[in-house]
Amino acid sequence: MTKVHNFSAGPCILPQEVLKKASEAVINFNNLNLSLIEISHRSKDFVEVMDNATSLVKGVLNVPDGYQVVYLGGGASLGFLISAMNFMKQGGKGAYINTGTWANKAIKEAGLLGNVDVIASSKENNFNYIPKSYNVPEDADYLHYTSNNTIFGTQFKSIPETDKMLICDMSSDIFSKPIDVSKFDLIYAGAQKNLGPAGSTLYIIKEESLGLTGRVIPSMLDLQIHIAKESMFNTPPVFPIYVNMLTLEWLKNLGGVEKMGQLNRAKADLLYTEIDRNPLFEGFAKTEDRSDMNVTFNLTDNSHKERFDLLWKAANINGLNGHRSVGGYRASIYNALPIESVQVLVDVMKQLNT
């Protein structure tokens, strides 16, 4: 097979060894002569998968005591509502930092339940930077932010300081580097960037922060119920969770998030160095806020677009077109993308400048 260099923003690249094991399990799982996707989710074989997928999250991220891990469906889009419903008090207020499309969607969902205070926003510059100055209202129940912005290519480089409960949508950079889970009351993340295929959503929850809202929460949206049922309140997305488990095993064997952080930094440095060096390209995001996961850039002269597009497609590069909100190009360099693929893109950019 011809090697394809997959820079897709999501669903995105997964490790080849993970895809191979997952494909085998679809045919014959654990030598049962049954497919993974046709056995009971309450069978011993799948309960072991769920237990492993949960314990691997705790081990890889060094999750402290007092936190619970659950896998649900609905993506981060449902997480926008679940987070507000489980942490905003009846008649309360959520504080939000608006750094792009997904943060804005979280703000919209929270507004259905109570008051929303957008304490900072980079909207006026088309979200090309991370706001640095803001105050969290005293009457806010929590502060919510989106750690990495796939569309605009910006990323928080430090965890916001607050004495309020802290909630983060970490969909597109979780497991890309070490994080201090103890700083958060809730982390949620759609799987389809660094964890697995679309269909499962990871929640890491500080258990003592739940049950404080005074509201009646529908069962399917109640994190306490999902914790009590160990992600089995309803039939879980069995195949995505299995792939999540395989990906976390791959990550652990590679050296964990510490090693992955080093590899991701090297990939990002390689690509950003070429963007800054090459007069035919310019980065979209402010330098200090550039994402290590999604590199957004533009041509300085669009007369080169036709040739550049021909060059990168001829090099078997996939998924490089930018989002319509930004235009230009976006190279998503998630965990499973090897640095060799980044080098291929850099070589094409150099070729354009010859």
Image (cartoon, rainbow, N blue to C red):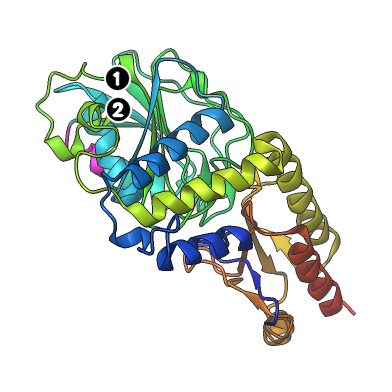
Q: Position of residue 221 (x, y in %)?
A: 19, 37
Image quarter (top left, top right, bottom left or bottom right) of the N terminus: bottom right
* Residue type for callout 2: Gly
* Residue type for callout 1: Asp
Looking at the image, the residue that sits furthest to the front is 32
Find residue 90 and report its image quarter: top left
Residue visible at 51% across and 57% down in the picture: 151
Q: Are the residues at dot 2 and dot 1 in contact (C-beta closer than 8 Å)? A: yes
Which is nearer the eye, 140 or 33?
33
- The numbered dot on residue 180 is none
> Circle 1 — which element?
loop
The stretch drawn in magenta includes residue 168? no
Q: Residues within 10 Å of mark 2 (few under 14, many from 20)?
A: many
- The numbered dot on residue 94 is 2
Q: Looking at the magenta stretch, what is its main secondary structure?
A: loop
Residue with the mark numbered 1? 141
The stretch drawn in magenta includes residue 110? yes
Q: Residues within 10 Å of mark 1 (few under 14, many from 20)?
A: many
Residue 219 position (above or below residue 228): below
Please report the bounds of the magenta region as a residue range: 109-113
